[in-house]
Image (spheres, rainbow, N blue to C red):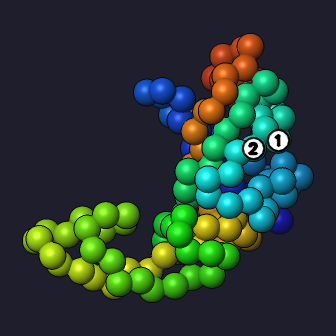
Amino acid sequence: MVEYKLVISEAAVSLARTVADPQAAGFLGKRVGETIGGELIGAAGYTFRITGGTDKSGFALRPDVPGARQTRLYVGDGFGFDAPRDGMRKRRTYRGNTISEDTVQINLVVEQKGPKPLAELLAAS
């Protein structure tokens, strides 16, 4: 059974919702940066963009790593690492950009608003 925690950001407000099968199955194979319809989570009229997430170990989904594999990258200041000194680099673990069974949290941003407020739609379902 697949279950995801969705964190949906709309302007300055973030909403959290948990989805399980069969709704969660619609997210399998989607990639960071893809757009999905709101019908998938019960928010008809809305469209969302996947901006990231985390896996079961807490490692971030990185948009430039293909697939759902876990990998270690040598990174500088930026995504997932804040270098305390200029020029410092460090090896960090990341997960690929594809949502799989190992993904726990998915971050979404509202691309297009629907007719009803999002908080009302998500509270009702």
Amino acid type, residue under disc 2 in the picture: Ile
> Residue drawn at (83%, 35%), measured in percent from left and top?
39
Residue mark closest to the camera, 2 vs 1? 2
Mark 2, other Cα within 10 Å: few <14 / some 14–19 / many ≥20: some
**Which of the labelled discs sits on residue 36, or is there none?**
2
Mark 1, other Cα within 10 Å: few <14 / some 14–19 / many ≥20: some
Q: Is residue 58 left or right of residue 46?
A: left
Residue 71: where, in percent of width, then height? 52, 85
| Residue that numbered label 1 is attached to | 40
Q: Is residue 34 above or below residue 66?
A: above
Q: Is residue 119 above or below residue 97?
A: above
Amino acid type, residue under disc 1 in the picture: Leu
Q: Which quarter of the figure has residue 40?
A: top right
Residue 10: where, in percent of width, then height? 54, 29
- The reply to whether callout 2 and callout 1 are in contact (CB within 8 Å) is yes
Residue 85: where, in percent of width, then height? 10, 71
Q: Is residue 39 left or right of residue 35?
A: right
> Residue drawn at (72%, 14%), measured in percent from left and top?
116
Residue 115: where, in percent of width, then height? 74, 13
Q: Is residue 2 left or right of residue 48?
A: right
**Which of the labelled discs sits on residue 81, or is there none?**
none
> Residue drawn at (84%, 53%), measured in percent from left and top?
26
Judging depth in this view, the residue of 28 and 47 nearest the camera is 47
Q: Quadrant of the C terminus?
A: top right
Q: Give the residue at the far right of this rendering.
A: 22
* Element type where label 1 sits in the image: helix
Q: How many marks?
A: 2
Q: Is residue 107 above or below residue 61?
A: above
* Element type where label 2 sits in the image: strand
Q: Quadrant of the N terminus?
A: bottom right
> Residue drawn at (72%, 34%), measured in percent from left and top?
47
Alpha-carbon span between mark 2 and mark 1: 8 Å
